[in-house]
Image (cartoon, rainbow, N blue to C red):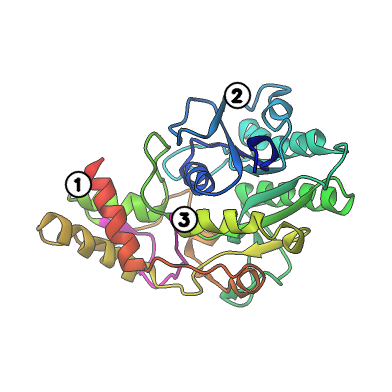
């Protein structure tokens, strides 16, 4: 297939933790890839690079010109966790909601061919408070925190645009994603990698609870492959959200102890202690609530499943963090 005939996939936020992993996964396939970032990303040689500030008016339309699909990973990184957003944060609102609104406007009424595909990275915490700990995507959404409400608003914009025939959009709602950061990419600021760095520094691993809170944790390589897989099933997935996860939710106490053990194996030192501490003032209800994800709906449509077990994923993360 001639280069011009290959579909063009645009990744917004290509220098971010997950965006950079998706660029590399896409680069191994048949599509042309355009990596869009505020700074020059470190990408494979055959990837087109577009450096721009997506907060600038008109930049989104320029970035997605001529595309067949868009993966919008651009996000407002704030604080050590990267996702805690205060009410009234206009920059976060601009990137999480305004960018999607501009994306829909840029893709609307393309002449010729099927509507462009959009695969949006949502969050499984968007569902809010539900009666059951295990969620499968059929629940009524009641997003609580600012971040979840912004993600939810962006999802609704894409759903409406899909119903109007302007795009073929779906949302993959993610659990906490962790793993090594690609060369030149933003660091993973999630809880697992944060604890890996603490353990490597010889510091105790602290929990804001008694350790029984459970989380489904997804390795970055498996998450990136899910987005690539979604592009191959765009028509079947369009118009709704889908949950990603391993289907298992270990307690964070067990996860933190596994992190301490993995670091100890790597360094040859004794495992650092895992301790409970009082929660900080900015703790949210979702921080203390267990969540287990049933990804079977997405798996049934696409055939996707997680390939990297937790112990191997932790070992890879520890090795990469120690090297960096």
Q: Residues within 10 Å of mark 2 (few under 14, many from 20)?
A: some
**Can residue 194 be spotted in the picture?**
yes
Check residue 29 for magenta coloring.
no
Q: Quadrant of the C terminus?
A: top left
Q: How many marks?
A: 3
Name the N-terminal-most of marks 1 and 3: 3
Report the front residue among 168 and 135: 168
Q: Residue at x 75, y 52 (%)?
A: 169
Report the front residue among 31 and 228: 31
Where does label 3 land, which residue? 177
Q: Quadrant of the N terminus?
A: top right
Residue 256 place in picture, x, y as percent: 30, 63
Element under disc 2: loop
- Distance from Cα at disc 1 to Cα at disc 2: 35 Å
- Distance from Cα at disc 3 to Cα at disc 2: 25 Å
- Distance from Cα at disc 1 to Cα at disc 3: 22 Å
Q: Which residues are magenta?
A: 205-221
Instruction: State which mark lies toward you, 1 or 2.
Output: 2
**Can residue 88 be spotted in the picture?**
no
Please say if the residues under marks 1 and 2 sit with CB atoms less than 8 Å apart: no
Where does label 2 land, which residue? 53
Q: Residues within 10 Å of mark 1 (few under 14, many from 20)?
A: few
Vertical order, 22 against 75 (above or below): below
- Residue 278 in the figure: left or right of residue 62: left
Residue 310 place in picture, x, y as percent: 36, 67
Residue 165 place in picture, x, y as percent: 88, 49
Name the N-terminal-most of marks 3 and 2: 2
Instruction: State which mark lies toward you, 1 or 3.
Output: 3
Vertical order, 154 against 255 (above or below): above
Residue 145 place in picture, x, y as percent: 61, 52
Where does label 1 land, which residue? 201
Name the N-terminal-most of marks 1 and 2: 2
């Amino acid at each position: 297939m001639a280069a011009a005939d290959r579909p063009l996939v645009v990744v917004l936020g290509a220098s971010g933790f997950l965006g950079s992993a998706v660029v590399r996964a896409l680069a191994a396939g048949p599509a042309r890839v355009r990596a869009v970032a505020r700074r020059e990303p470190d990408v494979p040689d055959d990837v087109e690079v577009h450096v721009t500030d997506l907060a600038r008016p008109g930049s989104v339309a320029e970035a997605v010109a001529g595309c067949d699909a868009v993966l919008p990973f651009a996000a407002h990184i704030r604080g050590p966790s990267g996702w805690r957003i205060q009410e009234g944060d206009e920059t976060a609102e601009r990137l999480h909601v305004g960018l999607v609104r501009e994306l829909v406007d840029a893709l609307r009424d393309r002449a010729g061919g099927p509507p462009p595909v959009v695969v949006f990275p949502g969050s499984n915490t968007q569902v809010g408070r539900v009666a059951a700990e295990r969620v499968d995507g059929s629940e009524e959404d009641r997003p609580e925190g600012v971040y979840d409400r912004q993600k939810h608003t962006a999802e609704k914009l894409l759903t409406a645009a899909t119903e109007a025939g302007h795009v073929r959009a779906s949302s993959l709602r993610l659990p906490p994603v962790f793993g090594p950061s690609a060369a030149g990419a933003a660091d993973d600021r999630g809880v697992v990698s944060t604890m890996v760095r603490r353990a490597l520094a010889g510091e105790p691993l602290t929990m804001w609870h008694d350790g029984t809170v459970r989380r489904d944790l997804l390795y970055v390589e498996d998450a990136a492959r899910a987005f690539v897989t979604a592009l191959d099933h765009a028509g079947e997935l369009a118009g709704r959200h889908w949950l990603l996860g391993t289907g298992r939710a270990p307690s964070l106490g067990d996860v933190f102890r596994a992190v301490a053990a993995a670091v100890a194996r790597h360094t040859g030192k004794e495992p650092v202690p895992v301790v409970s501490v009082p929660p900080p003032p900015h703790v949210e209800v979702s921080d203390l609530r267990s969540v287990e994800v049933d990804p079977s709906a997405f798996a049934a449509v696409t055939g996707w499943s997680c390939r990297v077990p937790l112990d191997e994923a932790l070992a890879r993360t520890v090795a990469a963090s120690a090297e960096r």
